[in-house]
Image (tube, coloured by chain):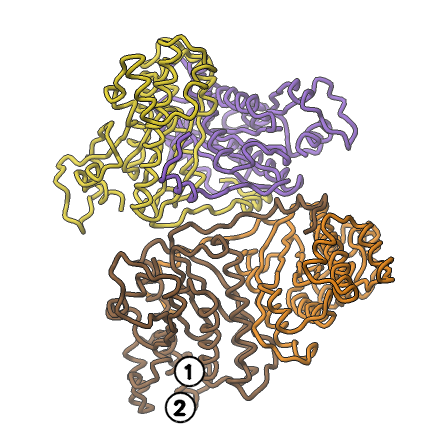
Chain colours: A brown, B orange, C yellow, D purple
Amino acid sequence: MANSRFEYVKQYERMDRLLPETYIVIRIDGKGFHKFTKKHEFEKPNDLRCLSLMNAAARVVMSEFTDIVLAYGDSDEYSFVWSKSTELYERRENKLVSHVCSLFTSAFVFNWPQYFEIPLLSLPSFDGRAVLYPNLSVLRDYLNWRQVDCHINNLYNTTFWALIQKGGLTNTKAEEYLKGTISSQKHEILFSQFHINYNNEREIYKKGSIWVREPEDVSAPSKNQKYSTKQKRKMGLRLLHVSIIDNEFWNSRPYLTILLN
Amino acid sequence: MANSRFEYVKQYERMDRLLPETYIVIRIDGKGFHKFTKKHEFEKPNDLRCLSLMNAAARVVMSEFTDIVLAYGDSDEYSFVWSKSTELYERRENKLVSHVCSLFTSAFVFNWPQYFEIPLLSLPSFDGRAVLYPNLSVLRDYLNWRQVDCHINNLYNTTFWALIQKGGLTNTKAEEYLKGTISSQKHEILFSQFHINYNNEREIYKKGSIWVREPEDVSAPSKNQKYSTKQKRKMGLRLLHVSIIDNEFWNSRPYLTILLN
Amino acid sequence: MANSRFEYVKQYERMDRLLPETYIVIRIDGKGFHKFTKKHEFEKPNDLRCLSLMNAAARVVMSEFTDIVLAYGDSDEYSFVWSKSTELYERRENKLVSHVCSLFTSAFVFNWPQYFEIPLLSLPSFDGRAVLYPNLSVLRDYLNWRQVDCHINNLYNTTFWALIQKGGLTNTKAEEYLKGTISSQKHEILFSQFHINYNNEREIYKKGSIWVREPEDVSAPSKNQKYSTKQKRKMGLRLLHVSIIDNEFWNSRPYLTILLN
Amino acid sequence: MANSRFEYVKQYERMDRLLPETYIVIRIDGKGFHKFTKKHEFEKPNDLRCLSLMNAAARVVMSEFTDIVLAYGDSDEYSFVWSKSTELYERRENKLVSHVCSLFTSAFVFNWPQYFEIPLLSLPSFDGRAVLYPNLSVLRDYLNWRQVDCHINNLYNTTFWALIQKGGLTNTKAEEYLKGTISSQKHEILFSQFHINYNNEREIYKKGSIWVREPEDVSAPSKNQKYSTKQKRKMGLRLLHVSIIDNEFWNSRPYLTILLN
């Protein structure tokens, strides 16, 4: 409404439109979560309450932005993958990143009491970034990267905390013990020393969490077809803990590729 | 920790470092607050509870980021002004904007029950943007712009809601009535029809809110001096509802200019 | 070599890397060519000497940068299309645009005497820009856009100058005469008034010029294959004046798609 | 003129407006000049013909763009410093950088025969970049950086080539000989072995070249005054080989600071 002689300062704003027809990934990360998890006495190596809360917050984000097709979360991070044709906020980077990050935070704080008995003792917060991927192949590699990361970290953490919680080692000793070990050696430590078969660990820990938008009728429209806006609105959201790396994930869900275009 | 063949996707991230030695302003805005205020039955034209909550959330942000020197808030928006020499997050735009926006949101949701009896019925969220201002003169014009905007909107809203609440007009009628009126005419309507002297309205409504960082000893260091980190940490935060346009604001607070450099 | 206390100013340089795996198009345009063509008495509507010189300069650019796969030129502009995987200058936008523009200019000035008897009376110059296209479909539409532009302009100019040179109209009268006419009407004017069959005009005028990189053995490698660096270096350059819009152009040159990847 | 269904591709262009009210520096650098100087048998350590040609080309650029206030050149590079209020090409980075680079190249090639007897045997070209400096202090440090760089390189090169040309050393031997030497040692080598007093070397080699725009009446307007466009157009260009680091340079030319604003 206001129109003053100071309004020229708006010219200093930069138009930060993201390149059209490329996949936008917005990844958010917990800030200072090491301290935050200590303060709230999170269970180690994984706190199922927090992962569930993260998933609930991600669900809110996906419900709000129907142009987000899928999301991948692990530990204190979540990646939201947008349809490459989205024109939300004219694809303005600042707006997209900050709004996703804000809404996720809002849901995280609001829903905390549903997942934790302990009240919030300090304020959780997240930062975000946008990255562009120009084709499906590199987009899939992005998701693969995050899931491999989840796996490597979880195997390490599972072994690390077994050594401490069940083996009686100090943090420093456990760290030294694991230095330079490879995957198979960690599996072996878990099994021989603690009778833990890593493969039997919960899928949510090993694979992370994947939210996908899912049509009521999963029989996909033919390749050239697009889902109508009406169809999109009716779609549900499904939470998965499976391999996103396997072709099977994509082949069995042709609607994802359609939605991403 | 993880180092996989997929890691090349990191190369798609853009280095979004903001130009050094320029003032960074991060402004956040409520998303869909028109609907949000209706749902939570906000008082009109101003809801003091919400303004107080906004100020409380802004205080949290300023406490967290000591390189923010001052902040200006009005309605559902808040602008945070950073020292031009800040190197936080290497001045990465995405990180700065999203983290400020997230922490503000976190504080807003967390502190809601302290200000409202009604529980949150929907999730509030904000978006943010960064704008760079290369010198103090244009930075001041930015703040002037926001404060003039606050004034113009508040005068309009005060008159608009008086016509409705006290004058019995419908929204549409009130809008028509005010169409094309200038400032003095709105003052006149308020005074002659509703015995409201606009000048006696609360300063927080007319001027908005200003948080400033304030030294314990307000006698400023000499012009070339800088505050030490220790001094900075000890500084308090003060909330003001005054003209930021008048030179008086800046002349009486020489430490602000020092902190901004 | 130098390392001084002033070197910190390098930090003000921005890293302007263009998004990987997207097609880079660098388009250069003559600056002030309206005046330049008048001063050097260019033939109207087309000056074959200048088009040939433009093509020669573009050839120099393509010879220098083997990652440019094809180029399209018309009037005083030229577009250079890069392989989407090029890593030249780390894909830094400023360097790519300015170097292409500089080398083109260098070749244009140096080769001028081979194409014009009249010496250079003022300095020609060009500006440039980079645009990213994330897939082949939109890249083709970019090239289609330039070729349609060439066609529309050439039909207009051919008719305009016929009205002046053969019809004796002034510039203003010719402009008025053509105002609002559609394609078929311009064809009709040319044919009925000046016995010019537009279809018989030179292809270089109607279609513009296309440089393509061409393998010695045009039997393309199989779809997954790439050309080796050695093969690339041996490739020739061919100048075409054909439709780039027709699928035929791309279907008959499968090596272009391979080179672009 | 043309308006086709392909025109949507223009949306892929990015608006690359440079931040207002900051000093734009455009620096161009010779590409592959090591090879180029060899081929054209440049004199070592400095070829006065080339430096003069560089200066002539820079003069053309400054004549064309009246918003360039001063320029600093050395070896095969030149930096052009713009008034911080310039709005040329809406401050679009691509256009500014590429046009300056192109015009410089054009002038370099065109004027070559005036400075060299040997004809051009290969095409010279340059790349360019834009850097923003938000205040006069850091802008001066930028220029200081380039001049210190010039000095350090020239002292090294002068000694290096004396060892070869007068001392009979091979390139490799000269390089080894100078490894780790500091300034005073190079002065000493020059003086004791070759009777060269470095201080007596030509100023253009030691200081580089500075073009400044200069008012007819050098008595500057009072501090708040600006030069009128008419006055600006009448200004001359002066070539200097002096210290740009000394305050004297700026103090004795108050009009430069006015022009830069």
Distance between mark 1 and mark 2 Cα atoms: 9 Å
Residue with the mark numbered 1: A174
Label 1 is placed on what type of residue? Ala
State the SS at label 2. Answer: loop
- D154 to A246, vertically: above or below: above
Residue occupied by mark 2: A167
Q: In the rendering, at what x and y percent does residue D128 appear?
A: 47, 35
Q: Quadrant of residue C177?
A: top left
| Residue at the spot 19% in from the left edge and 44% down from the top edge | C227
Up the image or down, C44 lies above or below A18; here it is above
Residue C148 screen position, x and y as percent: 33, 32
Confirm or deny contact between disc 1 and disc 2 (CB under 8 A).
yes
Q: Residue A170: x, y in percent?
A: 46, 86
The label on residue B153 is none
Q: Chain of mark 2?
A: A
D127 up-or-down from C225: above or below: above
